Amino acid sequence: MRKSDDRRGPNNFVNAVVGGATGFMCAMILLLIAAILTAAGKVPEKFMQEVAVLASGLGGLIGSFTAARRQGGRTLIIGITSGISMFLLTMIIAAFTEKGALSGALTPAVLIAIMAGGIIGSFLCAAPARGRR
């Protein structure tokens, strides 16, 4: 007997938001590590924009992988929606913290990095298609 969609677990929206929050927290931890390394003089300060984009991409990858693993199926849709929710969470927090954060040149790069990380993370989680009997 097959399981119905109602009994499989949380719906797509909840998984996408959880994945976005997980990715955001991972990106913030990576940025904290980068800030500590910059303060210690290990990483030059001129590389902080690239580090921010890289941390956003890795956060998107981890968040979408987490959300897709929780969902089980439809991994690409979950990965993209997880990336969208992470980007919206980032932009909402940026709107309340700094005046010029939303109109900066870094915003499109962060969006592309998060979405690319979301797609790659969902592909990493995707199981190979099984043949029908």
Image: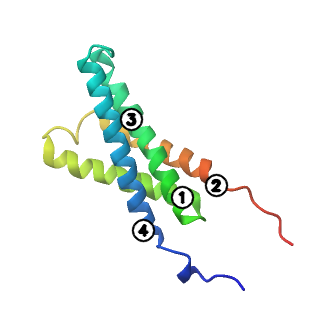
Assign a secondary structure to mark 3: helix
- Tell me: residue 133, above or below residue 86: below
Choose the circle earlier in sequence order: 1 or 2. 1
User: Which residue is label 2 attached to?
Assistant: 126
Residue 68: mark: 1
Marks 2 and 3, how far apart in space? 23 Å
Q: Amino acid at mark 1?
A: Ala
- Tell me: residue 55, above or below residue 128: above
Q: Amino acid at mark 3?
A: Ala
Choose the circle earlier in sequence order: 1 or 4. 4
Marks 4 and 2, how far apart in space? 18 Å
Choose the circle earlier in sequence order: 4 or 2. 4
Q: Residue 130, how many percent across, how many down? A: 78, 62
**Residues at badges 1 and 2 in contact (C-beta under 8 Å)?**
yes
Assign a secondary structure to mark 1: helix
Please state if 91 lies on the left or on the right of 12 as rendered. Answer: left
Q: Residue 56, how many percent across, how many down? A: 38, 39
User: Which residue is label 3 attached to?
Assistant: 55
Choose the circle earlier in sequence order: 3 or 4. 4
